[in-house]
Image (cartoon, rainbow, N blue to C red):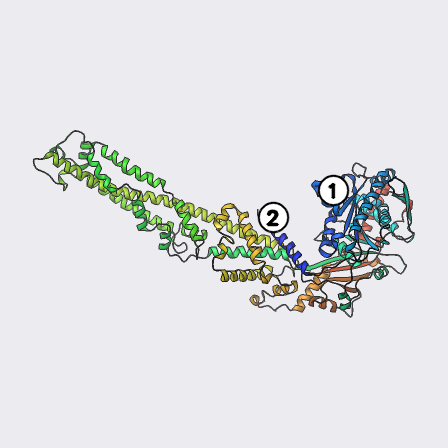
Amino acid sequence: MITSQVLLYGEQYAAEEEAARSRGDGRSSIHYPALFLFVGDKVAPAVAPVLDSCERKWDNAGGVMAIHALTEGASRSAASPENGGAVRRERVMVMALPDTAGHDPRTVRQEVYREFHQDSRYLAEMNRTLRRLSNSIADYGRLYSSFDVIHLSIITRVDDPLNVFLPEITLLARAVLGQSFKSVQMDLYALINEREQGENYGYSSSVGLAFLRELDGLQAGDYAFQAPLLVTEEELSIPVAHGPAPLFDLVYLLSDKNERGMLSAHGMSDNYEIISHVSLLKNRVRPTADQATGQGGYNNMTFKSGIRGSTGRQGYASAGFSGVRRPNRQIALAVLYHAFRRLAEGLREASPWPVRDRQALLGLGTDSLREQAAQLLPEREGLAEMTGLMSHGRPSYHELRQLSLREAEQLLFGDGGEAYFRSNFVAEAARRTEAFDPLRTWRGILAAQETAVPPVTFYQLAEWTADREDSGGGSVLYGLRQHMAGLRAVIASAQAELELLYAESVERQPFQRVPLFDKRTVRNFIHYLFTTVYGQKYELLRLESELAFCLRLEAALEQLHAESISRVKAMESLEEELRGIALDSIGRANDELGQNIMEYYRTVTEEVMKEIETRRGPGIFFSERYMGSMTALLAEGKEAVISRLIELCRKELLAAEPFALSFEEELLRRANVAAAYENREVLSREELFKRLYRNLEEGAVVNVRLFEYTQEHRHEEKYFFGDSSSEFLRYAFGVDETTRIYRLGFVHEQRRSGIEKLNLMGGFHLEDLLYYRNAKVYYETYVQNGYHLHGVDEAQLPELR
């Protein structure tokens, strides 16, 4: 299967194109240092995507650090060299927590919480790790505008038992970082994975609800905490205190099920993008271009005030994310398919060769066959040497004259003449025929013709060697078999004539008799016998040898046909596979992004390839510089063909000017490519923008499911990431300008590669979550059945709502 090879090419092109266009884009920078703290084993899949997103988006992301608090077993695995430990230690430090494995699920959160507080080594190691991390962050101080504040983003899964340590980990991190920074701004991102609960949905929901209940307490206005968390190298403990105040500045609840109750097609991936984009929004360097656009941008105090209800109770937040980008992967796969299809069409084009020229190329013309067959026989003059054969006795002419020629030969030589002819003529002709290898002779000829203009390819050879008369203007195999049928008829006639000649009497033969010289007359007869009779046998042998020669040619043509058909089928199979891969990838894009990709890039690919052929000559794509011999590539396997094709597409086709359009222009051209053929109304720029706007808005639906009628206050803010001077964003700002009830802002980035949208929504409370209401039933049941789901005493927690 070539699927993985092709998909890798598509992904590599998309990544390279994204990087190239991003280098042309003006990326944002963050104002203060940023640190991501991941808590729990279950959040491990988020680490790399979040940091990768920051690398793509932030100009100074090189100094962004992360720390992952996870179980001891998992932390050892994460730090091992075979798991990229060296790289992880550079940018992602690990912090060990008590193992959850082996504990009773009924009490695991309670037991690991007690183990953490009873075993001082955990706190001591956490202190050392956080201090090393703080020093590492200080090394990157030159990257930031200010070192007064650090943005600490804590990320965890609500159903991970290790988030029972969230207050201790968070406050210790704040205490250690507070020794280097004047302020530590902390946000929590709580991930709800509803897709993967599976068979453990009841227990998982209960653990998730236990955490949310604890979180409600952490975010209460009167929340206070004190514990000896700071540990010196002499193992002296120093208390850390908090409150009374909410623990986190803002808490974002992000699920893989959106506000409409639909599971996200991208799983948690959109939430990882949300985390990096919200972090950028809150910590972005505001360029002067922002003032030029008249957009105020994000204000954290305004958002916090907006999501606080009339009772003063601080609400929770969520977000949705979507992006519109040039579908680079789909484009690459479509171009690969169309390039291959056009190459195959070039190979398939009917050869202008008439049947006589086809026969001449392969040496299958009548004259050529006769000449080649004649070369297989020893020289005819060798028959004269047969007169030197020893006769049996010395019969007189009188004894011979009444005999038939066959009887006379038998009397004179027995089987000696036949034996000599078989040995010196028949066997030698058979040996030479057997040694003849038509395919070896043809391969060099056909290899040269494959690169000729026009070429002779295996498509044409499949037609030339087909077993039917009307194949592509004339089958050489059919012609050869006609010739062989004629030969068989001639051979049968020659054999009959030879038999008649052998049956004639000696005295009726026209050889010279010498009266009174009987021996001379006998010698004259012997000379006549070998010259005439064996001369006729020689001609019969020539015909039979030509037939044998044709039989070898026939077998070679059949083999050539089988090889050619095999190559044709391999090409058809490859074309179908490439088409399927391209269509499957396009089908995963939304309607606008995937619209007309195959149609538009068929035209673009053909135009680019035609331009290259016009500039460099016909047949250039089958030169060694590009594809080379397709026959040779197929012999190596499909992977070899695809490898050369990928190289051709990347170096010559995708590098051409038509592939350098901005995403807006590319999308508009692609949307209208079929208009001329289907006679439908051309899609206007405004209509296209309307569709894009709708898609961005629908894609950025908030990733949390609520009972909206219970929500005390809903506050929304929406932000576009892109070039605010672009036509599309000017259009987006004008949509419902007079009626919108949400705050709209832009994160201005000079970019041509695409546009992203981040929708923020807040003001709801935990009891508004559908997840909370569903999990509450399981939580209460599990607690009633003896499950201890909290580290602290339940009396310290807020009541369930």
Q: Which residue is mark 1?
A: 78
> Of residues 336 and 620, which is closer to you in this image?
620
Question: Is residue 261 placed above or below 390 in the rendered structure?
Answer: below
Tell me the kind of residue under disc 1. Ala
**Residue placed at 62% from the left, 61% from the top?**
595
Quadrant of the rendered image containing residue 735: bottom right
Tell me the kind of residue under disc 2. Ser
Residue 498 locus on image (x, y percent): 22, 41
In 3D space, how far apart are the residues under numbered discs 1 and 2 (Cα atoms)? 27 Å
Q: Residue furthest left?
A: 516
Task: Say few, some or many: other residues with alpha carbon within 10 Å of mark 1 (under 14 / 14 to 19 / 20 or more).
Answer: many
**Residue placed at 77% from the left, 57% from the top?**
30
Q: Please give left or right for residue 355 compared with residue 56 in the image.
A: left
Question: Is residue 92 placed above or below 519 in the rendered structure?
Answer: below
Residue 357 locus on image (x, y percent): 36, 55
Residue 66 locus on image (x, y percent): 77, 48
Q: Which residue is mark 2?
A: 4
Which label belongs to residue 544? none
Instruction: Find numbered disc 1 in the image and state the secondary structure of the residue it sits on.
Output: helix
Q: Is residue 670 visible?
A: yes
> Of residues 752 and 679, which is closer to you in this image?
752
Q: Please give left or right for residue 293 compared with residue 766 in the image.
A: left
